[in-house]
Image (spheres, rainbow, N blue to C red):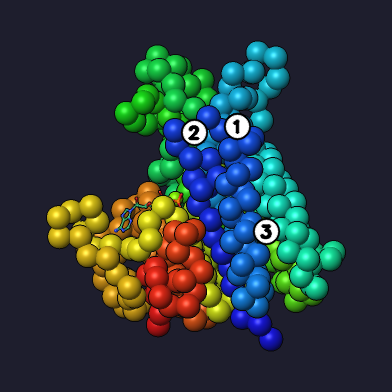
Amino acid sequence: MSERIVIAFGGNIMLRSGEDGSVEKQLEHVEEICEFIVAVIRERYSVVVTHGNGPQVGEIMLKDEIAKKRFPPMPMDICGAESQGMIGYMIQRYTVNQLKLEKQSYSMNFPVITVVTQTLVDACDPAFRHPTKPIGPYYTAQQARQLEKEKSWQMVRQQAGYRRLVPSPAPIDLVESLAIRTLFAEGWIIIAAGGGGVPVVERSDGTLHGVEGVVDKDNTAALLGNIVDAETLLILTGVDRVALNYDEPDEKKLDSMTVEEAKRYLGEGHFPEGSMGPKVAAAVKFIEGGGRRAIITSLGHGLVALKGEAGTTIVQ
Ligand code: ADP
Ligand code: MG
C-alpha cells in the first residue's frame, strides 16, 4: 500500500500579489502545481489535494460588488463553493493532461476528481461572536460606516482601506467525508475542502445551512489528513522553512521540531495568527490526530522535503 499524503497549497501560489490575475498567468501557476502533484504521484504516493482560496474568493466578491446594480451579490458560502469548483476544475484538467503527456502506463483515464466540500462548524463556536478574518473588497470610511449600519457587518481598518471581518470557526467534520474516503480507497486523486471548505451549521432537524465565515484552510487540511488516514501532511507556502524570530537579525530556520516544541514556540508567539500560526497549529493537530509527519515548505522544495532534505518537518 502506498503512503497517503495530503498536499495543501496556499491560495497565493495561483494568484500572486502584483500579478494581473489573467487566466494565462493563473494557468501557468496551476501547471506548476500539477507538475508537482504528478511528481509526487510518481514517487508512489496516494494524493489528496487541498488549497487556499483567499485571492480567488476575494475577486469573486469584488466582481459581485462592482456588478451589484445589475446582479444581486451572492452570499459568502456560494462564493466559496464557486471558488472550489473553479480551482478544482483547473487542477483536475492540468493533472490529467500532465499524466497523459508523460504517457505513463497508469496515465490513461487516471481518475482525478474535485469534491465540493462543506465543513461542519458549531453554531455556538465563540468565533461567531468575535470575527477575526478580513475578507473581500476594500471600502472607504464612509462606505464602511454605511455597511456597518445597513448589513451589521463588522469592519476593520487596514492600510489600503476598510474591509469586512468575518468569523473563522473551527472545523468539526467534513460533510462529504464518506465520499472522500470511498473515492480515495478506490485510487482516485481527490481535490477537496478548498478554502477550508464551505462552513455550514446543522439545525436541530438535521438540515445544513451555509454561514458567513471562513474556516482556516490549514486547520481543515489537518482534519482532511486525519479523515483519509494520511501519514504525511505537506503544507506548501511562501517560505522554504519555518523560522524562530522570523525576519529578525537573529532569525533561526528550523529543520524539524517535535509537537511539544511546536506548541511551546506557538505559545512564545513565534508564529503570527494570520500566517504561520495556523500552519504550525495544523501540523500539531494532524499528528495528534494520528498523522506521522507534517512538512511546511515551498512548492520548489516540496519534493526534496518529502525525502527529509528540506523544509521544516514536525513529528511526534
Ligand atoms: P498561505 O497563502 O500559504 O496560507 P500565508 O501568507 O498565510 O501563506 O502564511 C505564510 C507566510 O507566513 C510566509 O510566507 C511568511 O512570509 C510568513 N511567516 C510569518 N511568520 C513566519 C515564521 N516564523 N517562519 C516562516 N514564515 C513566517
Ligand atoms: Mg494563509
Please tell me whether mark 3 sits on a helix, a strand or a loop: strand
Q: What distance separates the C-alpha of mark 3 from that of mark 1? A: 23 Å
Q: Decide if ligand 1 comes within 8 Å of the CB at mark 2.
A: no
Tell me residue 232's x, y (percent): 53, 75
Dot 1: few (<14), some (14–19), or many (≥20) neighbours within 10 Å? Answer: few
**Residue 310 at least partly seen:** yes
Badges 3 and 2: C-beta atoms under 8 Å apart?
no
Q: Which residue is mark 3?
A: 191
Q: Residue at x 61, y 81 (%)?
A: 3
Please state which amino acid type lies under the numbered disc 3.
Ile
Q: Nearer the viewer, mark 3 or mark 2?
A: 2
Dot 2: few (<14), some (14–19), or many (≥20) neighbours within 10 Å? Answer: few
Please tell me whether mark 1 sits on a helix, a strand or a loop: loop
Viewport quadrant of the N terminus: bottom right
Q: Which residue is mark 2?
A: 19
Q: Which residue is mark 1?
A: 22
Please state which amino acid type lies under the numbered disc 1.
Ser
Residue 20 higher or lower than 244, as above or below: above
Q: What distance separates the C-alpha of mark 3 from that of mark 2? A: 25 Å
Label located before the other in sequence (3 or 1): 1
Which residue is nearer to you in this view: 179 or 105? Answer: 105
Q: What distance separates the C-alpha of mark 2 from that of mark 1? A: 8 Å
Please state which amino acid type lies under the numbered disc 2.
Glu
Label located before the other in sequence (3 or 2): 2
In the figure, is residue 89 to the left or right of 154?
A: right
Tell me residue 63's x, y (percent): 61, 25
Tell me residue 20's x, y (percent): 53, 29
Q: Residue at x 70, y 14 (%)?
A: 70
In the figure, is residue 185 to the left or right of 172?
A: right
Badges 2 and 1: C-beta atoms under 8 Å apart?
yes
Residue lying farthest to the left in this orientation: 249
Which residue is nearer to you in this view: 20 or 220? Answer: 20
